[in-house]
Image (spheres, rainbow, N blue to C red):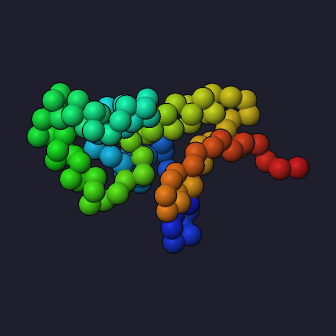
Amino acid sequence: MHLHNGAVTIGPVRNLSQWLEHLPPELDAFVRLQEQGVPFEAAYAQCLAEQGQEFVDACEAAKRSKPLVTHDNLAELTALSQKGFARQPRELLALAQWSDHVSGFLVSCEPFR
């Protein structure tokens, strides 16, 4: 994982949630609705009706920390990692964390010749 300070961290994919600032799980449904084209107000109202104060608290927490990924994104990155590790030659998940997004891609473990 490439960090803002230029450092690189290598570790197990199960620790992704510790390395990447992520939205509280209560906001995943809201993000999904937004990605489906539901207007902000309608998505907010639906999630508020379903989750109540937990949703409001999660919104406030997200405003303070400005995370770049959701729990859904973490699950997608984990699935990508598992897919790459099952291949021959194996591929490892590499992440780049930018100021406004996180990019994930697979990198071959086969040595260059």
Residue 46 placement: quadrant: top left
Q: In this rendering, does residue 1 appear at all?
A: no
Q: Residue drawn at (56%, 36%), measured in percent from left and top?
A: 81
Number of numbered discs present? 0
Work out whether 14 lies above or below 65: above
Q: In the image, 61: left or right of 74?
A: left
Point out residue 26 in the picture as x, y percentages from the top left corner: 25, 37
Point out residue 27 in the picture as x, y percentages from the top left corner: 29, 39
Q: In the image, 70: left or right of 77?
A: left
Point out residue 5 in the picture as x, y percentages from the top left corner: 51, 72
Q: Residue drawn at (74%, 34%), measured in percent from left and top?
A: 89
Residue 83 placement: quadrant: top right
Q: In the image, 106: left or right of 81?
A: right
Q: Residue drawn at (52%, 51%), measured in percent from left and top?
A: 102
Work out whether 40 lies above or below 113: above
Q: Residue furthest left?
A: 53
> Is residue 4 or residue 109 the one in the foreground?
4
> Is residue 13 or residue 62 the one in the foreground?
62
**In which quadrant will I find the N terminus?**
bottom right
Point out residue 11 in the picture as x, y percentages from the top left corner: 50, 50
> Is residue 40 or residue 73 the one in the foreground?
40
Q: Residue drawn at (38%, 42%), measured in percent from left and top?
A: 70
Q: In this rendering, does residue 106 appear at all?
A: yes
Q: Residue furthest right?
A: 113
